[in-house]
Image (spheres, helix red, strand yellow):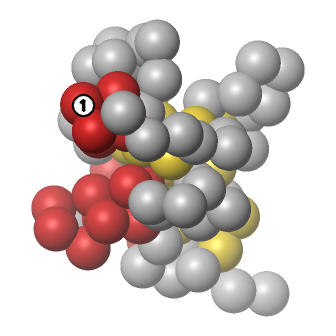
Amino acid sequence: MATCEHVRSVPVEDPAPGTPQGCQECLEQGTRWVHLRLCLSCGHVGCCDSSPMRHATAHYQKEGHPIVRSFEPGEDWRWCFADELIV
């Protein structure tokens, strides 16, 4: 079974979302999203890879923050971009 060392760096409480109303970049650019992801390093809210702009992945590629969680109501799963694993 694969493991992820990055989960050790995840804070006990999620950071406050920077833009709780939606994807930061989509809101700025007037584009749309499908689902949202919350960066557990800094609170950035970005859109998922099913969204046209894929801002959560772009945030990981730019900042190197490895773990996001779903920012959808009723969902609490987490994804590590670095290890490509649900954690």
Query: Residue at point 47% right, 72% down?
Result: 81
Left or right of 32? Residue 86 is: right
Left or right of 76? Residue 71 is: left
In this rendering, is residue 12 above or below 48? above
Who is closer to the viewer here, 45 or 51? 51
Query: Residue at point 16% right, 61% down?
Result: 63
In this rendering, is residue 58 above or below 23? below
In this rendering, is residue 65 above or below 74? below
| Residue 37 x %, y % | 53, 41
| Residue 50 x %, y % | 67, 62
Query: Residue at point 53% right, 40% down?
Result: 32
Q: Quadrant of residue 20?
A: top left
* Rendered-image quadrant of the N terminus: bottom right
| Residue 85 x %, y % | 65, 74
| Residue 79 x %, y % | 60, 59
Farthest right residue?
Answer: 74
Residue 33 in view, yes or no: yes
Left or right of 51? Residue 39 is: left
Who is closer to the viewer here, 31 or 42? 31
